[in-house]
Image (spheres, rainbow, N blue to C red):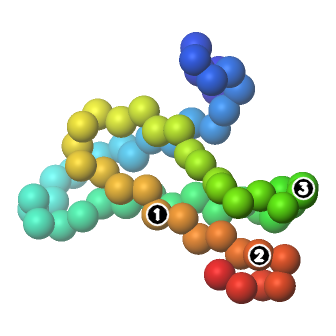
Amino acid sequence: MRDEERGECLGLELKHEGSVPAVVGEYVALRLKEPVPIPGRPHTVGVWVKGDSSWGRVNWEVEDARGER
């Protein structure tokens, strides 16, 4: 998709199907088919999120070149 502020990006949306009690969390997981190497020696990785103030969370799992998470 193309975002007006950020340009080309990946879009992901959680579609609610049915209803669940308020205490049940819903989630969506995204995993890359292939690793994406980050050149150089980066010290920071970030994500730009446009949300709807629903108290959602973003969790990361990053694996380094040695296979450590």
Residue 46 is situated, as x and y percent measured from the top left of the image, at 59, 49
Q: Which mark is residue 59?
A: 1
The residue to which callout 3 is attached is: 39
The extreme top residue here reads 4
Q: Calculate the distance from the C-alpha at mark 3 to the C-alpha at mark 2.
A: 12 Å
| Position above or below: 53 against 69 | above
The percent position of residue 51, horizontal first and vertical second, equals 36, 36
Category of crowding for the residue at label 2, using alpha-carbon neighbours closer than 10 angstroms: few (below 14), some (14–19), many (at least 20): few
As drawn, is 60 to the left or to the right of 23?
right
Residue at x 56%, y 45% (from the top left corner): 47
Q: Residue at x 39, y 46 (%)?
A: 14
Q: Is there CB contact under 8 Å for labels 3 and 2?
A: no
Mark 1 or 3 closer to N-term?
3
Residue 68, by quadrant, is bottom right
Circle 2 residue: 64
Disc nearest the viewer among 1 and 3: 3
Cα separation, mark 2 vs mark 1, equals 16 Å
The answer to whether any part of residue 36 appears in the image is: no
Looking at the rendered structure, the kind of residue marked 1 is Asn
Identity of the amino acid at label 2? Asp
Residue 60 horizontal side relative to residue 20, left or right: right
* Foreground of the two, 44 or 21: 44
Q: Secondary structure at mark 3?
A: loop
The quarter in which the N terminus is drawn is top right
Identify the disc placed on residue 35. none
Vertical relation: 47 (above or below) 31 = above
Res 35 quadrant in image = bottom right
Secondary structure beneath label 2: loop
Q: Nearer the viewer, residue 1 or 3?
A: 3
